[in-house]
Amino acid sequence: MEVFWYLPTQGDERYLGTTIGRRPATYPYMQQIAQAVDKLGYGGMLIGTGQKQDTWIVATSLIAVTQRLRFLVAFRPAIMSPSVAVRMAATFDQISNGRIILNVVTGGDTKELAKDGVFLDHDQRYELTDEFLTIWRSLMQGEEVTFSGRHLKVAGAKLQFQPVQKPYPTLYFGGSSDAALQVAAKHIDVYLTWGEPPQQVAEKIAKVRRLAAEQERTVRFGIRMHVIVRETTQKAWDAANELIQYVDDETIAAAYRRFAQSESEGQRRMAKLHNGERNNLEISPNLWAGVGLVRGGAGTALVGDPDKVAARMLEYADLGIDTFVFSGYPHLEEAYRVAELLFPRLPLQTPTVATLDQVATPFNEFLTKTDLLKPQPV
């Protein structure tokens, strides 16, 4: 099992639905999170894509200030040449000595993609992703590629140097539509699902495995969700309720209308978990849909004491999940809490660099010295 963390390049939050306690994504703050995640023993860190700070530049800037941390760099095939993307990834892989992983994000929002000059419908975007990855994987393996597809063309393309990782850095990918699952089965190393209840995750895993077997391939699986772990279950649920204490019904209703009409099948599935209602948000034991009331993308969190959260993670692991990509608000403090409380109870692939005492002491000092925890004026 591996546990990854998330870098909030869009800015960090203390509470959802308000600017109280909000922190801008300054470079010193992002560096602080990255170095904590590096030292605490996380397997990697996701840096998302979209209308926020540039993923590649942020990730590259953090290579020199970390030692072992792997960067799960998200990028969108529709706005990049596959040949350029290969050179960028291979260069990063060399500079970091093999510390890049790639999260392929086709994108599910036509209006957002139009801001970057992409005017393709849902299925066309997955057609392009298929062509992109066909070219990308061939180039990464040293082949000279001439390719003419419906969306992409290259002639005599070749990578003139090799990445550290062979045959190429690991490819992650998420998507719940039939078109997305076909791309995953054909090209992807790790299929990344959002945090749905175990039964739904099991069904999705079975489908991807079947499709991959038809391609004579095998696929690993990861899950993207949030986590709220505290010393006791009551404290964890109190923290969950505090996170959404400023979210009003009007904001929830507006977000639900937007999510329910999304082109993204995964986003619609997230919205159905709560149906825009703040009651009965525990949709499965210790699985809470409160984050998804107002946040797009991953909308669920595991909530509980360390033993309960670890037990739920092991249930997902039994289904085939081997990588957990977590978030927590705020991301700096929660990175420490998760490492302190949860890591000792997990069969982690990556050994923790810090002992429990080494983790707890700096975190406790951080809580007493920092002003970041104090609510700020709106």
Image (tube, grey):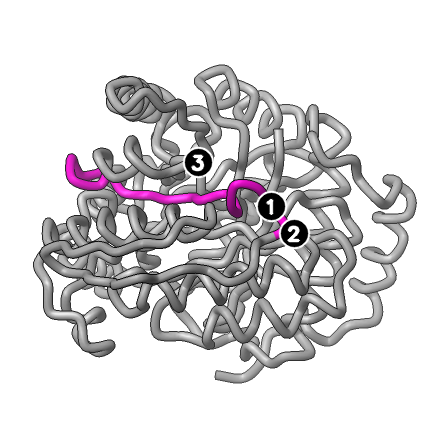
Residue ID at (55%, 55%): 6
Q: Kindly indicate the quadrant of the structure image that contains residue 309.
A: top right
Residue 138 in picture, x, y percent from top left: 37, 47
Q: Which residue is mark 2?
A: 98
Q: Would residue 125 appear left or right of 172 to someone viewing this image? A: left
Among numbered discs 3 and 2, the one appearing first in the sequence: 2
State the residue at coordinates (21%, 34%): 182
Q: Amino acid at mark 1?
A: Gln
Residues rendered magenta in the picture? 164-180
Residues at marks 3 and 2, CA–CA distance in whole angstroms: 17 Å
Left or right position of 115 against 19? left
User: Which residue is the site of mark 1?
Assistant: 165
Q: Is residue 227 left or right of residue 225?
A: right
Vertical position of residue 352 compared to residue 76: above or below: above
Lower sequence index among marks 1 and 2 = 2
Residue 364 vs 18, above or below: the answer is above
Furthest toward the bottom, the residue is: 377
Q: Are marks 1 and 2 in contact (CB under 8 Å)?
A: yes
Quadrant holding the N terminus? top right
| Residue 208 seen in the figure | yes
